[in-house]
Image: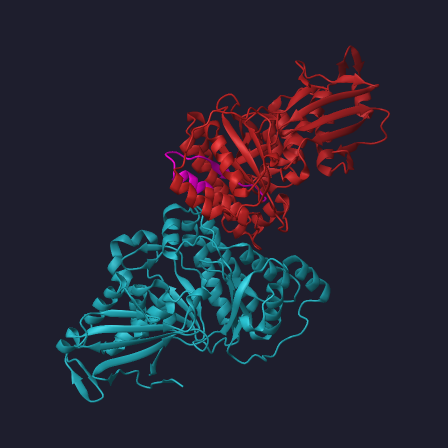
Chain colours: A cyan, B red
Amino acid sequence: MEKDTKTGQPKWEDGKLKITAISPINIALIKYWGKVNEEYIIPLNSSLSITLSTDDLCSTTSVYLSDQFENDTLTLNGESEEFTTRIQGMMKVIRDQVPEDGIEVEGKKVTKEELLKMHVSVVSDNNFPTASGVASSSSGLSCLALCLAKIYGCDMDMTEISKLARLGSGSACRSLFGGYVEWDRGFDNLEEVDSNLETIGKNSKAVLIQDEKHWPDLCCCICVADSSQKKVSSTKGMKTSVETSEFLKHREKVIVPKHLSMIKDALKDKDWNALSEIIMKESNSLHSVCLDTYPPIFYQNDTTKALISMVHDLNNNHYEPIAAYTVDAGANVFLITPEKNLKFLLNTVKDLAGLSDDKIKFSFEKDVESEHNQVDGDAMTKIENEYKSKINLHQIIVTRVGKGVTIIDK
Amino acid sequence: MEKDTKTGQPKWEDGKLKITAISPINIALIKYWGKVNEEYIIPLNSSLSITLSTDDLCSTTSVYLSDQFENDTLTLNGESEEFTTRIQGMMKVIRDQVPEDGIEVEGKKVTKEELLKMHVSVVSDNNFPTASGVASSSSGLSCLALCLAKIYGCDMDMTEISKLARLGSGSACRSLFGGYVEWDRGFDNLEEVDSNLETIGKNSKAVLIQDEKHWPDLCCCICVADSSQKKVSSTKGMKTSVETSEFLKHREKVIVPKHLSMIKDALKDKDWNALSEIIMKESNSLHSVCLDTYPPIFYQNDTTKALISMVHDLNNNHYEPIAAYTVDAGANVFLITPEKNLKFLLNTVKDLAGLSDDKIKFSFEKDVESEHNQVDGDAMTKIENEYKSKINLHQIIVTRVGKGVTIIDK
């Protein structure tokens, strides 16, 4: 098994400097939608996410430095990829922060000059298939940011590294921490943005709200929907929303601040009733903005909608909510649920979707304690009749809250 | 054929007083969504609709008065229906306005006292099936309002009668006029409503913006979608939106006033580019609010969304928009298009939906002049590939702008 290093230091391998990290994906509960600046990747609104366990889904990224490399390269899941402008931007920030007296790795000194002459090779792999519909940029770019900061010996804490990750992919900054993480947009009023871009670029960062031990029993079932819809990338989608939605600014000014304040209280108090309601309302709010975009952006398909309505029907038939749904820029549904409801929820969705056991990816202890008969027979029969043929899923990936990006000994 | 009477007067039939009217349906282009008062049926925002020709879709309503009836009755499409509280409310308003010296019908006097002693029988029929998914309340209740005002000899103009129709079903008030009609909500600021209900009840009325001759070539293809979704009635849906949507008040305060002002200009100038864009944005805005409602209300299904995206794709491949879509509280799509585009649009949708000719209800002259090859071959091939199996329709009803409710000789 791979093991966390205490030091998080690079090492030598075949004459090359090397460091490796694993990083989780994160799922936004308060959604990031819209940038106010594309260069600095400053978001229109602050967001907040749950970090998912690297035991189930993760990116593993190694960074190598060597003066024998002819240029900077990126290999993603075994394929050579473009070393994008954004990654070049991250490299520039890092190279500006290399210590004057260089670094020392396993007793061997490397001067600043030598470091800056070396080229970089980035090798990144996800343990989840692209077809799973789970966005990989949040895990891949947070991994890269941590590796770069460590291998160049930069004096940066996780907060500083989150800003670096942000430059690679906005939401990646939230994977720097485990548990429940806010991406603080870095400014108070929209009006101040244009004249303060550099300052805001330094303020826009990840903030740990509650770590993964605070509320450890929250699970997430990633319901991977079968979607044949024309896909609008989230980058393009949010750009069009910023340009055309008549609701987005109201969301930025009024709704997100309210939801953020409420979700922080709900997390602090471990108030599942409050948390689940905010999660669902936030998801709806995002897709409402997408529909108000011109032309409208449809991420949810009939399966997404059936799952959402099913959750409301389940919740209405129980003394407290059984699950909360959240949907990103796609048709997949993330079902958040306390561990005690997991078995019941999973069996319900599995049956309605007609999924066989091999379509359920479940890496942690399956026999979690579970309440029985959470919804009474008549109500369940009604729910089965209502949704039986309406939910088409490829697979369900079951995971839970976990820790942030970590250097590993590999 | 039935014929308009010049006088619009009641007559005697088998010893009973009788009057008959036909009324159009209207389709909101600026949407009505939400009431501020349920008793007076005061809408949250003003709305604006296109009145559709009674040649294609209409309600025919006869009102009989007789002292031989034992009570007030309502027969709808041949079936006995409840004489609802709302209709009783309309009756009360009318009975309060019967002239002191009664009425004279075909030379025979009927005193006020005699009129008030008589019971009423309402017989209403729609020429479109309920399954067509076209709401019948706007035509049925506007018919009833006109008939009641005329048979009781009340001194009410169309504006006054629109207020009466409003009490039966809010949007019915807009069917009093042909062409393009606003339902003026009757107040300026939301804050003044609660203390001025009676005044606002007198101000909330239909206003003719442009009659049907102003822009006569606008057609409407009603694409009746195959929907198996659980249906939330618009009455219930808008109530839940008022209670829970975080966007609805912003829509009331900022968006609807802007859209209303823009659509009136577009109608005045017969500016199809502007009109089509506002129609589509308004429709999206309504469904955006529905999605932001808690629990979210889904009226659009995958067919609705495919038709909407198809319209954008067609429009993007032509020098001016080919059509505009608008969707009410259901999955049906109303495609508005100038006559010159009708043939092309209809053939496109028909082919994509795989509809046979007998599923196209088309009562007016089919061989309308039409431009050819409005979208070039490559773009059309792409559109066909994209939407071919995604549009499931029962039928298409083709109609056009028409005149308002009218007394007929029947």
Question: In this view of the protein, which residue sits in the foreground, B82 or A11?
Answer: A11
Residue A338 visible in this rendered orientation of the protein: yes
The spot of residue B258 in percent (x, y) is: 44, 37
User: Which picture quadrant has residue A393?
Assistant: bottom right
Q: Which residues are magenta?
A: B311-330
Question: In this view of the protein, which residue sits in the foreground, A37 or B309?
Answer: B309
Q: Using the image, determine if residue A380 lies above or below residue B259.
A: below
Question: In this view of the protein, which residue sits in the foreground, B362 or A283?
Answer: B362
Q: Using the image, determine if residue B309 lies above or below residue B369.
A: below
Q: Using the image, determine if residue A97 lies above or below residue B194.
A: below
The spot of residue A74 in percent (x, y) is: 28, 69
Q: Residue furthest left?
A: A113
**Which image quarter holds the C terminus of chain A?**
bottom left
The residue under the point 39% across, 45% down is A244
Left or right: B406 in relation to B382 = right
The residue under the point 54% across, 70% down is A359
Left or right: A137 in relation to B55 = left
Q: Residue furthest top?
A: B107
Left or right: B326 in relation to B380 = right
The residue under the point 54% across, 81% down is A365
The spot of residue B189 in percent (x, y) is: 51, 39
Left or right: A124 in relation to B113 = left
Residue B248 visible in this rendered orientation of the protein: no
Is B316 contained in the magenta span?
yes
Is B276 contained in the magenta span?
no
